[in-house]
Amino acid sequence: MIRRLVPFLAFLWTAAPAVAQAPVRIGLSAPLTGPDAAYGQGLRQGAEQAVADLNRAAGGRPRWVLVPADDGGEARQAAAVAKKFAADNVRLVVGPLESGAVAAAAPVYEEAGAVVVAPAAAYGPLTGRSLWNLFRLGPSDAQQGRAAGGYLAKAFAGRRVGIVSDRSTFGRGLADAVAARLKEAGTPEVLFDGFPRGTRDLADLVARLRAARPDAVYFGGLAPEAATLLHAMREAGLGATLVASDGILDPAFAAAAGGDGEGTVMTLVPDPPRLPEPRGSRPAPRSPEAESVAAGAYAAVELLAQATERARAADPKTGRIADGRKVAEAVRTGPSRTLLGSVAFDARGDRSGAPIALRIWRRTPDGRLDYAGNDAEP
């Protein structure tokens, strides 16, 4: 993995002027406390190592400096962090993690002329707001929905597909994306329905499903409702394959679905690469939550650093960036070489060709329900 980084890091080293340059600050907005602190620490570890590797490639000079800030995973706190970064002339930002925090902070950054790379925010409309400064590395919910629709159109070609959601913004967005993809493929759904989150009695919905006779059912929603739907379908004798997003990526799904979860297909972000081994020190231990986002933060720092260099956006005397628009234009003209591979963005700020995996939940020899290693054909 380190070999992949050498060409880019060497480029930054050789491209840097011989005279010392003031360091450029990169802000990190992350939930360093609160319920998502494990993820926030992963963002911090990934960003810190990226900055250290970039500085090492520049001969050990502090070419880049990370400025971490705790947004608690909350929208109001993320907006406050954005205002603080704006006041401190921080024009490059990694994060926030949560979609709600990104939605609250991105307009503040836009007004301040700051570029934001969100490693994991998935809410579809985030990048539909015509913000010039926002980019996301992970696939959006809409991209997951389209991937699921493509799978259904291929795997169930000539057969009947139903679509059900929990009627939340998240679930309905997924359902709409699946329906659009099926329509494009010439195989529209035979039923489009839903039920509110927390509903336990699905007799009426199941009756409509039985009348529609689907071979597969896409569900847009979260793990508890997916398990409820599965139980209701199986009790009614419906053997249709359930397909869902990583909204069901929760230990609660395996526990609640039990044997009825066997064969459920799920779209999700592929397992991220591990950070390159740090030179001269042992790698810091990371929790599974931290491991899942660390590479994204590392790649976000790489993106911002490359774009800043290409745009010559930083004042060599002060390290300040007067306006991030040049950096944003450089990000858009990519692709950029990162730990996640070659990364490019579309006009909205979504990653072009964001990788999405398909996994099947199956029983393990010890009786558990798991998806690890069970790939489905896209």
Image: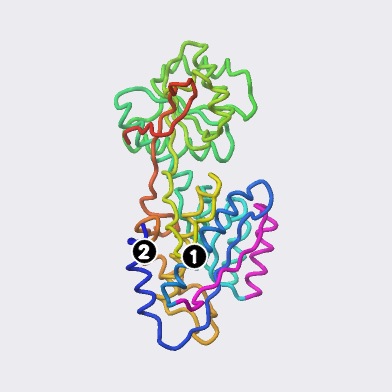
Residue type, mark 1 in image: Trp
Side of 259 relative to 196 (left or right)? left
Residue assigned mark 1: 132
1 or 2: tag closer to the N-terminus:
2
Residue type, mark 2 in image: Leu
Residue 133's x, y, as percent?
A: 51, 65
Residue 280's x, y, as percent?
A: 46, 65
Where does the magenta region start and end?
60-88
Whether residue 74 is in magenta: the answer is yes
- Depth order, front residue of 127/343: 343
Q: Quadrant of the N terminus?
A: bottom left
Residue 335's x, y, as percent?
A: 35, 63
Q: Residue at x 37, y 54 (%)?
A: 352
Label placed on residue 247? none
- Depth order, front residue of 252/189: 252
- Depth order, front residue of 69/291: 291
The part of the image, by quadrant, that contains residue 70 is bottom right
Q: CA distance from mark 1 to mark 2?
A: 28 Å
Mark count? 2
Residue assigned mark 2: 5
